[in-house]
Amino acid sequence: MYNLIGQVLFISMLASFILSGMALLVSRWSLTRSVYLAGFFADILDFFYLPLRQIFLKFSDTRVLDKWMASLKNRAHKSAFAKTKQRIILAPHCMRSLDCPAHSTQTGIQCKSCGKCVFTQLKKDADKYGYKVFILTGSSYVKNILKMEAADGVLIIACDYEINKVMRALKGKKVTTYGVPMENDGCFGTVVDYQNVLGVFEDFKSFPSV
């Protein structure tokens, strides 16, 4: 009996190791190419995220893991995101100007379009392509926003860690997520390649009805 239990545990551990290894390899490939079963492998990485994060923390960089996972989930979600109709953008306050005059509410920073940072242009382009912009000082705002907004598509502009974190938090909800990673991370002075943002707008072109 104990021998059988030991064999089952060994096989389970071996299968877990093989599956998570394959999923990591596929996620790395997703940075440069389309991959098959992206959603399946993304689910595997979500399931093993905490132990994998500890491994990357010890032997590599956890940002690498989050980058691969965010990329894989973009591949997995691309088709579904293209079908969404009510889209919002979640972006971090760390991209705004240090002397930003805007104030904060329960749904984030209320941009005044002062022209001091990228958010003035982002709001203008987002409106053109049918998105509503929310500038967040933390991921805890997401819950309040989704209670107030009837969104089925969430475009996340953030560092890879925050993109993966929000994607994991919204998994199983009635929304489809897609991410645009920033060029750097930190608490202030972060930037996003705005051409990448425009590229996503064009890829999922959807104009508001008039």
Image (spheres, helix red, strand yellow):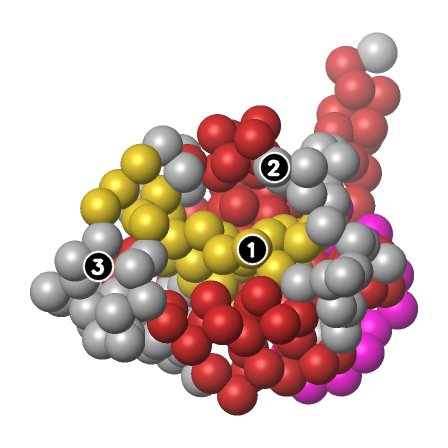
| Marker disc for residue 149 | 2
Q: Residues within 10 Å of mark 2 (few under 14, many from 20)?
A: few
Tag 3 residue? 187
Q: Residue at x 80, y 54 (%)?
A: 84
Q: Quadrant of the N terminus?
A: top right
In this view, 188 is above or below 169: below
Q: Is residue 51 left or right of residue 7?
A: left
Indicate yes or no whether the magenta region holds residue 44: yes
Q: Position of residue 61 (x, y in %)?
A: 38, 65
In this view, 5 is above or below 29: above
Q: Position of residue 52 (x, y in %)?
A: 53, 50
* Element at label 3: loop
Q: How far is the residue under mark 3 from the one under mark 1? A: 23 Å
Q: Is residue 125 visible?
A: yes
* Element at label 1: strand
Q: Is residue 44 visible?
A: no
Tag 1 residue? 132
| Segment tinted magenta in the rendering | 31-45
Q: Position of residue 107 (x, y in %)?
A: 41, 38
In the rendered structure, are the residues bearing label 2 and label 1 in contact, judged by CB atoms less than 8 Å apart?
Answer: yes
| Marker disc for residue 173 | none
Q: How far is the residue under mark 2 from the one under mark 1? A: 10 Å
Q: Quadrant of the C terminus?
A: bottom right
Q: Residue furthest left?
A: 99
Q: Residues within 10 Å of mark 1 (few under 14, many from 20)?
A: many
Q: Position of residue 78 (x, y in %)?
A: 78, 65
Q: Amino acid at mark 2?
A: Glu
Q: Amino acid at mark 3?
A: Cys
